[in-house]
Amino acid sequence: MNKIIFASSNYNKFEELVRIIKLKNTEIIFSDNKFEAPEETGTTFFENALIKAKYYSKKFSLPVISEDSGLCVKALEYQPGIFSSTYSGTNNALENNRKLLNKLKDKKDRSCFYFCTHVFLRKFDDPFPLFSSSQWNGYIAKESIGKNGFGYDPIFIDSKSGLSAAAISLKKKNSISHRFRSLKKLEKKINKLNLNE
Ligand code: IMP
């Protein structure tokens, strides 16, 4: 059985990932907080995902899948973007949501999208990283709706169904989300490799 580390300190993301991605003969392990997280000094989702993948593959000496994701709001010049997890200055989702609702108080255009990028490295100096990305279009609600999900889900409304990401089941979220679409592309690419080579 091959082992791949999912490089993240966010267990919610891991919970979604293991339900979405199926890799041949491979177990995916949550990196947890075993090592202090690296500084995310990139200016793009892709750069930050690569920083995390390189850091954790070196620490664990194992192949790694990393993710960088966030919420991009059109009326706020696509912020919070790569700064989504600490938008309010803390890592607290309630505070982040409150700040965002406040910023949008007088804005007509509430459209937004979740974006994520995934990177896969066989080893930290792998010259052939695999990557994928996707987005999920929606708009920001006027107030929190629903109890499922994490982060901005209670205020993110899926543009197709009109339901908040926290009001739909995890199963439903995992069939339409940015994470689902990106991971399905990565799954295809990884399953073409021979991880024992
Ligand atoms: P990262 O750990 O630096 O990639 O930060 C990702 C942040 O983006 C999370 O902490 C959330 O604030 C936000 N985010 C990304 N994907 C989702 C999602 O599926 N639901 C809710 N919030 C999300």
Image: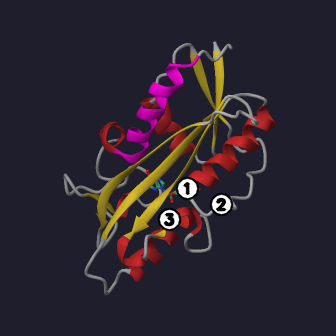
Magenta region, residue range: 177-193
* Residue corresponding to mark 3: 81
Mark 3, Cα crowd under 10 Å, few <14 / some 14-19 / many 20+, is many
Q: Nearer the viewer, residue 56 or 42?
A: 42
Q: Amino acid at mark 1?
A: Phe
Query: In this rendering, would 7 be left or right of 78?
Result: right
Q: CA distance from mark 1 to mark 3?
A: 8 Å
The percent position of residue 149, horizontal first and vertical second, equals: 41, 50
Mark 1, Cα crowd under 10 Å, few <14 / some 14-19 / many 20+, is many
Classify the position of the N terminus by image quarter: top right
Q: Nearer the viewer, residue 42 or 59?
A: 42
Between tags 1 and 3, which lies in front?
A: 1
Tell me the quarter of the picture where residue 169 sits. top left
Queried on whether the Cβ of the residue with tag 1 lies below 8 angstroms from ligand 1, the answer reads yes
* Mark sitting on residue 45: 1
Residue 35 seen by the camera: yes
Query: In this rendering, would 176 be left or right of 197?
Result: left
| SS assignment for the magenta stretch, majority | helix
Helix, strand, or loop for circle 1?
Answer: helix
The percent position of residue 70, horizontal first and vertical second, equals: 49, 58
* Residue corresponding to mark 2: 42
The percent position of residue 15, horizontal first and vertical second, equals: 50, 37
